[in-house]
Every structure is written in C-alpha cells, then in structure tokens.
Image (cartoon, grey):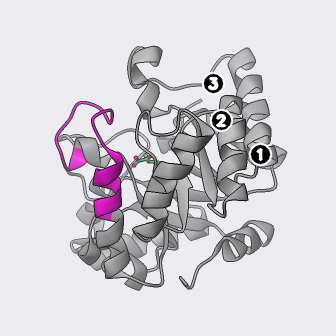
Amino acid sequence: MSKITVSTLNKMKAEQQKITALTAYDASFAKLFYDNGVDVVLVGDSLGMVLQGGDDTLAVTNTDIAYHTRCVRAGSRDLFVIADMPFMTYSSPLQSCENAAQLMRAGANMVKLEGGEWLYDSITALTQQGIPVCGHLGLTPQSVHVFGGFKIQGRIEEQAKKMITDAQALEKAGAQMIVLECIPAELAKRITDAVDIPTIGIGAGNQTDGQILVMHDLVGISAGYIPKFSKNFLLETGNMPDAVKKYCNDVKSGTFPSVEHEFK
Ligand code: KIV
C-alpha cells in the first residue's frame, strides 16, 4: 500500500494543504520525485508526445501505459500513482473495467479518464469494482481534433457552467479527484468550490487543491518551448533534485503558479 492514499489527499484538501503532482514514466524519476516531496505521480498519456515524439496523445495504448506504470511503481512503493486511460479505451463500462484492471495490476492506485457527464456509467462501474477514478476536464488532449487544436477551454460562460455540472456529475458517479487543464483561473476556483473532491490544476491558476506539470516542462525540454502555464525550475536551481524541491515548495506556498502563468 502506498504511503499516500485517497484519504490523505482528501485530508489535504480539507486542511487546505496543496497537493503536488508531476508526470513520471520510469523508475528513476519516480524515486527522485518521491524523495523530493512529490505527493502524486501521473503516468500520463502525454508520454505519446514527450517520450514517443507524437504530435498528440492518440497513438498511446493501454499496454504502453501499463508498461510505464510498472516502471514507475518499481521506483517507489510509497508514491500515489495515477495511470491515464488512453484514447478509446473507456468507451463503455465493460471496456473501461477491463482496461483499468490492466493498469491497476501494473501498480496504479487510480485511473484517469478524460471527459464529463457522459462518463457517468463507466465511473460508477469502475468504482463499484474497486477502481478509484480521477476525472479530467477542460483542455482534454484526447479531444484535440474536436477542439481544433490545444486551446484554452471554458472562456464562454455557457461552457463554464457546463464544466461545473460535469465536475459535479463526475463526483456523483464516484470520482475521487479531478484534473483541470488550461481553463481560466476563476473557473477553476468555481469548480474547486463546487465539489468536495480534490482538484489538481495545470494551466488553471493557483486556487485548485493541487498542481501538476508534465515533468519535461518542469525542466524546460518539452518540444523546445515552455508553455505559458509552466516554468523551468531547473534553470533556477541547476540540478534535478532541487528543481523538484523548489516546484513542490512553490506549489505548497502558493507562489507557483503565479498570475503570469494563468489564463483569464
Ligand atoms: O497526460 C498527461 O500528462 C496529463 C497531464 C497533462 C495532466 O493528462
């Protein structure tokens, strides 16, 4: 059993202690992250871009995520590990359960699915079978072709309201955490206040219950540029353990992300 559990994460939200998260794909970084203060790691399907070099995340398979989850778990028994469910692996409750089972057996503590209310039945089925679920709203990269690119979501009030009801539906279905990606900071706060489960932001301002970054962004090597919502912590600190420590300290103290990293 990992040292950090869903109960720890709920307690952190209740006590207003920020949750720190990073993506990880292998054992060495998983250990480094745990040793330097990271609470949660996500084996993200971002690996399709940062490891496999794709333009998006759509080519990633469940077997890819299971392999990297096994690597991450081997690096630390204590970390709370979330495994991403790839594109088209959770189209029905049965398919969701079969694929999530593979990820849980590989060492995940929770699985993450992109989408809103339409996932209700799948999330209910997963939680009934003992599989904890993290939702993901906002800029959900598996829908990049529907959005017409990697664009900020929820800027129109109608979309914002829909995102709040989606978050409430995810919670009602049994989700125990929600990632909010690239939405206005003010909307992220409204969602965080509207649910009792922890919210983890990326490009969503600093009023969520925690923060996550793709680890390559933290060290400034994602596709040769730093997204507006990220920061190169390696540049400031000069070595990897200190970069991770600084990220965690800045998230915990609320100094990262600052206004320059958020969307209006
Ligand atoms: O795949 C991933 O790394 C993610 C994060 C951006 C939250 O979903």
Query: Residue drawn 59% across and 33% down?
Result: 115
**In the image, is 39 to the left or to the right of 233?**
right
Q: Residues within 10 Å of mark 2 (few under 14, many from 20)?
A: many
In the rendered structure, which segment of residues is drawn in magenta?
Answer: 50-68
- Helix, strand or loop at mark 1: helix
- The disc, 3 or 1, on the residue closer to the chain's N-terminal end is 3
Mark drawn on residue 173? 1
Examine the image and state in which quarter residue 54 appears. Answer: top left
Q: Does 56 appear in magenta?
A: yes
Is residue 181 among what the camera can see? yes
Please tell me whether mark 3 or mark 1 is closer to you in this view: 1
Examine the image and state in which quarter residue 66 appears. Answer: bottom left
The residue tagged 2 is: 119
Q: Are marks 2 and 1 in contact (CB under 8 Å)?
A: yes
Query: Residue drawn 62% across and 54% down?
Result: 133
- Establish if 184 lies above or below 45: above
**In the image, is 84 to the left or to the right of 58?**
right
Kind of residue sitting beneath label 1: Ala
The residue tagged 3 is: 154
- Establish if 21 lies above or below 113: below
